[in-house]
Amino acid sequence: MDLFLETYTRQLTKWGEELCGDNVEIIRTPDALTITVADGLGSGVKANILATLTTKIASTMLREGADIDEVIATIAETLPVCKVRELAYSTIAILQIRPNGESYLAEFDTPDTLLLKNDQIQELARVERVIAGRKIRESHFTLDLGDTVILISDGVIHAGVGATLYMGWQWSNVAQYVSTLSAKKHSLRSIVSSLINTCGHLYSGKPGDDATVMGVRANLPLPVTILSGPPRDRSQDGQIVSTFLASPGVKVICGGSTAQMVAREAGLRLSTELGTMDDELPPIAHMQGVALVTEGILTLTAAMSIIRTFAQAHDDLSASALLKRSDGASRLADLLLNRCTHVRLLIGCAVNEAHLVAMPLYIGFRQQLATDLAKHLRSLSKEVVIEYY
């Protein structure tokens, strides 16, 4: 089975600058995940432009089928060496991972990329060769289920230099820290967030350099299909129920009318768990073959609020208390945040006349809710598809 590659990025901007001089570009295609991390010379606007240009050139060319020699040659011609400092205008790391885990890494003037297998740092076999006058280090390796890759910029290993730490954090210390976090079974978000937060502390809250931490973890894909709302045309009830029940992975129903439709069309029994009702949300229900059955708009809105908090918090530890409740919204948010990799939203466009009386602006609200939910889930590396009926 192909792997699902979860990604997460955090950055620090040099103190006094508005723009980060590092840039990360992520491109997903059916053939590979391509990640490009660049560190522009200096800081601020100029460094940001240089890093952005570097990642755009590399990712676009690789997506169009160019090989690494062509990419590096183009970057070398576009961004020549600084004559004053005799340094490249931008460093770069390129990581390509195939769905089967086959991986290729090219590094130019960047700190060594970290590979974690079974919570231990694995030394990558690197071969150095010269491309367009640049010394490039290349590695070929296989990413297995549960493995984690961490790409970092210079600002990470320089954290605290001359202040809290005489020589900075140093790569070996970073590697040990990441390994310790992994051994404690931290999520990818937590590892990346802890790493960048520690950099901030070592810089005493005033980063002396831009810092980037880019993480990738290999997971098994787990699809979730959410059905919410009957179709606009009632003659399609049977079709959408069949599509829903035939979907692979975990199945969720959001909406009382939707649950009744599925029960009627599939001949399934629907029972309510009154113990899950609280002052804010209706109780959940149970149906054979469906992992979770909840009320519709209120539950989806509450679940999206939790997910939005996670997306904006940059740290799943600080928001974990939101998932400890037993109501439908918390259960749905936990499923979408911590268990699934792919989300398929089947959104019915029928208008509930009872809602129109109390909420004249209801028309289109479910569709907008689905759009907002998809946006936040995608920011958390979930693959989301929306289908309207």
Image (tube, rainbow, N blue to C red):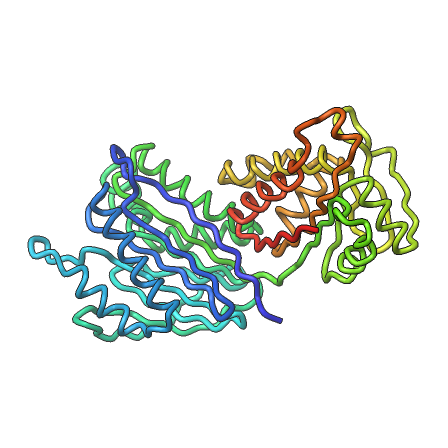
Q: Quadrant of residue 164?
A: top left
- Vertical placement of residue 72 versus 226, above or below: below
Horizontal side, residue 37 vs residue 360: left or right: left
Residue 2 is left or right of residue 181, and the answer is right
Image location (x, y in percent) of residue 1 = 62, 71
Residue 294 x/y as whole percent:
78, 40
Quick one: which residue is furthest to the left in this view?
Answer: 84
User: Residue 376's x, y, as percent?
Assistant: 55, 43
- Residue 302: name its quadrant: top right
In the depicted view, which residue is nearer to us: 372 or 99? Answer: 372
Residue displayed at 58% across by 46% down: 374
Tally of numbered tags: 0
For this rendering, which residue is in front, 330 or 304? 304
Q: What residue is at 21 percent from the left and 74 percent from the top?
A: 130
Q: Give the residue displayed 30% in from the left and 65% down from the top.
A: 107
Query: For the point 82% across and 39% down, which residue is it?
Result: 256
Give residue 98's position: percent from left, percent from top: 49, 70
**On screen, 227 above or below 133?**
above
